[in-house]
């Protein structure tokens, strides 16, 4: 990464969409511009958990405005991250597909634990270095993330389905503030957050930090009123703010210095969740952090730049160990598959090669469950695991490669419309055939070519005679691709 490089992060939250642009300088990212729009997608989920047309349009309109500012940014320099509302929405694919086209960059839906990890990174990067044990809390529109960590390393991450938009809609639907409504909201929040007690006990952290959204809004109000020291939220300050809301009796009558208009409608739900967290985790004082999810996404771009610093690589190694994968064989298959892919793919496919490497290393994880149909078990694991560093679409991509690595391709139910995915799959299946004896294959004079709808593998003279089983498996591979739009051709001698 060169000094002066511009990076951008887009945070598609449940209440607001945010865009932050930073400049990389000497190992740090300096903020250049910041844009925020209140979109309230979290309030646009209908009874069937589908985003309404109006909610999707609000989001697309915002992304179009962000896209104008991001014009000309290289794809590798932009990270767009979507959180709880789009995790929940049943029609999320429709929003994400069009949203990515409008924005000009892919949108990653991240799991709750991955969102928590990114939040911690954002908070930690903007704090002075110290050895203190940190508790980080982020109350979003439809989820709340709680993290323990030290320096740049999170040690426990969790995400709970409770947030300012969801709780305001559920317990303050008419915007009315009453003692009974607050009591019901806080009891309900504690019921959801109760499982955090075991992990996040008071003796596990030294300093509590609050990130973004609700915490930032509360901190601004308390500082403007002098009810808490600047940059801090105290129990006494929260009690004062709670009393102010009860006195106002409704959201539209709240008049507080420091409270922005876009926060007025969701302040009741946010306060009730924050009060519940203070009580549950025995917090007396919380510091308002400057960092948040978007800063974590920016620094994650730096880590992803090199394989050796990409957290996803260490996550893959952890999955291999957890599911008892034969590491030497997995590495062998990965090396051959990526070698074939790099030789056949167009320039600029390095990231796709890295994903193929991960899929190859994980292709046998399903064998811990059962050898019969283990590719289906492996795909299920990847689609339902929390894997640090990975977005949900990335994990699904790996799961589809694992699902299709053996058997007749047309029976796997894969989407074969993407040529790059097809080439990845062909290279993976070819590598597995060549490594069938679980030893290093003879690759001298062996090549794979990909053009149009056809893949051709070729060998040197007498290769088939020297390796008849490998030749047989590759000839069978051409049969496995029948009844698909793609052709696998062997020219083995």
Image (cartoon, rainbow, N blue to C red):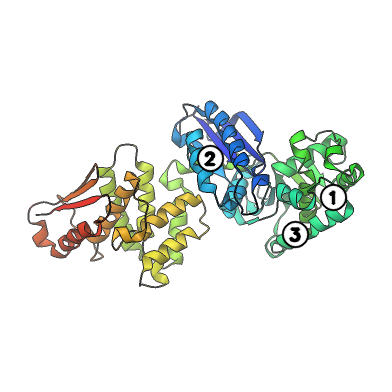
Read off the residue under disc 2: 80
In the image shown, does 76 or 265 lie closer to the viewer?
Answer: 265
Q: Position of residue 213 (x, y in %)?
A: 70, 42
Q: Image point 77% across, 51% down: which residue?
A: 274
- Distance CA(mark 3)–CA(mark 1): 15 Å
Q: Residue furthest right?
A: 247
Which image quarter holds the C terminus? bottom left
Which image quarter holds the N terminus? top left
Q: Is residue 249 visible?
A: yes
What is the tally of numbered marks visible in this picture? Answer: 3
Read off the residue under disc 1: 235
Q: Are marks 2 and 1 in contact (CB under 8 Å)?
A: no
Q: State the SS at label 1.
A: helix
- Distance CA(mark 2)–CA(mark 1): 35 Å
In the image shown, does 257 or 300 lie closer to the viewer?
Answer: 257
Q: Position of residue 394 (x, y in %)?
A: 45, 50
Q: Position of residue 22 (x, y in %)?
A: 56, 31
């Amino acid at each position: 990464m060169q000094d002066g490089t511009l990076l951008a992060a887009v945070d598609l939250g449940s209440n607001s969409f945010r865009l932050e642009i930073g400049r990389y300088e000497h190992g740090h990212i300096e903020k250049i511009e910041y844009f925020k729009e209140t979109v309230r997608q979290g309030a646009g989920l209908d009874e069937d958990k589908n985003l309404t047309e109006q909610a999707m349009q609000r989001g697309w309109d915002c992304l179009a405005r962000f896209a104008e500012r991001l014009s000309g940014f290289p794809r590798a320099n932009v990270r767009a991250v979507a959180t709880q509302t789009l995790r929940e929405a049943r029609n999320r694919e429709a929003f994400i597909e069009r949203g990515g086209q409008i924005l000009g960059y892919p949108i990653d839906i991240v799991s709750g634990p991955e969102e928590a990890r990114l939040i911690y990174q954002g908070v930690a990067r903007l704090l002075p270095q110290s050895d203190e044990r940190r508790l980080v809390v982020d109350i979003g529109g439809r989820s709340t993330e709680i993290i323990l960590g030290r320096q740049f390393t999170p040690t426990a991450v969790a995400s709970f389905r409770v947030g300012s938009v969801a709780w305001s809609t559920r317990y303050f639907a008419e915007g009315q503030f009453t003692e009974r409504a607050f009591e019901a909201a806080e009891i309900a929040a504690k019921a959801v957050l109760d499982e955090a007690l075991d992990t996040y006990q008071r003796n596990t952290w030294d300093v509590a930090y609050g990130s973004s959204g609700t915490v930032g809004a509360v901190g601004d109000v308390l500082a403007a009123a002098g009810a808490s020291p600047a940059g801090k939220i105290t129990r006494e300050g929260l009690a004062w703010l709670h009393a102010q809301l009860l006195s106002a009796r409704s959201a539209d009558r709240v008049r507080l210095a420091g409270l922005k208009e876009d926060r007025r409608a969701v302040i009741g739900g946010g306060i009730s969740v924050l009060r519940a967290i203070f009580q549950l985790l025995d917090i007396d004082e919380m510091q308002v952090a400057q960092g948040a999810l978007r800063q974590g996404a920016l620094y994650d771009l730096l880590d992803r730049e090199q394989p050796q610093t990409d957290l996803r690589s260490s996550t893959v190694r952890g999955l291999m160990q957890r599911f008892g994968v034969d590491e030497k064989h997995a590495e062998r298959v990965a090396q051959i598959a990526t070698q074939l892919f790099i030789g056949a793919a167009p320039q600029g496919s390095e990231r796709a090669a890295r994903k193929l490497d991960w899929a190859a290393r994980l292709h046998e994880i399903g064998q811990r469950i059962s050898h019969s149909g283990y590719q289906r078990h492996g795909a299920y694991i990847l689609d339902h695991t929390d894997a640090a560093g990975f977005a949900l679409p990335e994990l699904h991509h790996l799961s589809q490669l694992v699902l299709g690595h053996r058997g007749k391709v047309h029976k796997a139910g894969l989407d074969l419309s993407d040529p790059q995915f097809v080439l990845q799959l062909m290279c993976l299946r070819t590598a597995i055939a060549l490594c069938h004896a679980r030893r290093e294959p003879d690759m001298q004079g062996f090549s794979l070519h990909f053009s149009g709808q056809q893949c051709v593998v070729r060998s040197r003279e007498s290769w088939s005679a020297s390796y008849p089983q490998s030749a047989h498996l590759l000839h069978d591979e051409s049969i496995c691709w029948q009844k698909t739009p793609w052709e696998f051709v062997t020219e083995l001698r």
